[in-house]
Amino acid sequence: MLEQTIGAVGPLDETAMTAARDRQARLTKPAGSLGALEDLSVRLAGLAGACPPPLPEPAAVVIFAGDHGVHARGVTPWPQEVTAQMIGNFLAGGAVVNAFARQAGATVTVVDVGVATPIPGVDPTGVPAAAPGAGGEPASGVGALSSRLVTARVRPGTRDMTVTAALTREEARAAVETGIRVADELITGGVGILLTGDMGIGNTTPSAALVAAFTGADPAETTGRGTGVDDVTYQRKVDVVRRALRRHTPDPTDPLGVLAAVGGLEHAALAGLILAAAARRTPVLLDGVIAVSAALAAAAFAPESVGAMVAGHRSAEPGATLALRHLGLDPLIDLGLRLGEGTGALLALPVVTGAVRVLHEVATFDAAGVAEK
């Protein structure tokens, strides 16, 4: 499945991109006045192979969740059980991602790809019980915009990457292919844009390791404060990333090996989601540092997959900026966010839709009878 997906990733369509540039030049506005939105519309036309490209709707945010053995190294003050507890909150409709998804009209799919502890309100078969919203009341709008759980657990969290590889190659492949399957299901069901989400206490530590491995940057540059750790914990976190990289010396030309050595199950699944979106010529709107570190792996598997990626925002985590620079992507918004879950991507979604809607709805000078300069 992985090899077939990689083989289906192709370049952007130059004919469609030329048509989009020509149309932008004829619309009733000064040339270039929409800045980055014009470039984005051209790239989305190239991805779709059509001008104008389809409107990016409906939208689906996919939250891949997993735990991390490196949590035992004291890289975060948050207990590991919070991963499972937050999944319960997602399913209840009470998290920030749910609020933003309702505002954006997006569905939320939560994928347990490697959670280490039981999920509240979910029986051992992975079926969620009926869950109330925040404060014990039904969350507003949840009935219309569903949150669903997909149970695809490869293993109950990764191993401690400072001691051994976080995953075997087979486990890393299984997680990548989980992401591919979820993306294929959603796109086949009519979804027009995928948004990346994540949940995993401690997952900014493997993200920092992935960014360092793929970009060659020093761990002190790629590692941030995650959930807001103090100075002592931050220095410990940098040291943990450095030790893991020294132990494994991951090869950036072997993305599956990098994911196995220092990645997380959610990182691997996100890489698969991105690859499948690119293979299906569907845009994927990236969230924060977890997503862009996974995007580095996707680009290492298939460089042309970058054509399907849209950087939703610039995370406050320093590794995110390094990863975006390596990918050649400019973020659409910069609000100092560092929550994850898919929140930044959801806030950027109207910008993407607006960029495409201009090509659909704005009149040309000739059609509107407006004089050109």
Image (tube, helix red, strand yellow):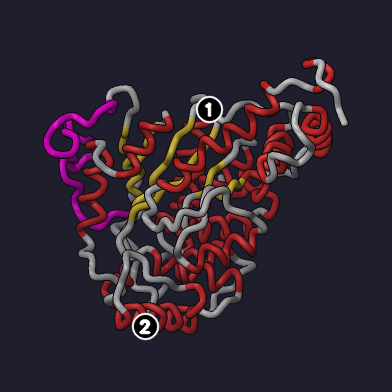
Residue drawn at 41 percent across, 65 percent down: 167
Q: Between residues 238 and 350, which one lies in front from this camera angle?
A: 350
Q: Quadrant of residue 298?
A: bottom right
Residue 370 colored in magenta in the image: no
**Residue 142 image offset from top left, x and y in percent:** 28, 28
The earlier-in-sequence mark between 2 and 1 is 1
Q: Over which residues does the magenta segment extend? A: 114-142
Residue kind at label 2, given as amino acid type: Gln
Q: Quadrant of residue 100?
A: top left
Residue found at the far right of this picture: 373
Residue kind at label 1, given as amino acid type: Glu
**Residue 141 image offset from top left, x and y in percent:** 29, 26
Q: Label 2: how many residues lie within 10 Å, few (<14), some (14-19) or many (20+)?
A: some
Q: Main secondary structure of the magenta part?
A: loop
Q: State which quarter of the image contains the N terminus.
A: top right
Q: Is residue 8 visible?
A: no
Kind of element beneath mark 1: loop
Label number found at residue 57 = 1
Residue drawn at 51 percent across, 42 percent down: 348
Kind of element beneath mark 2: helix
Label number found at residue 235 = 2
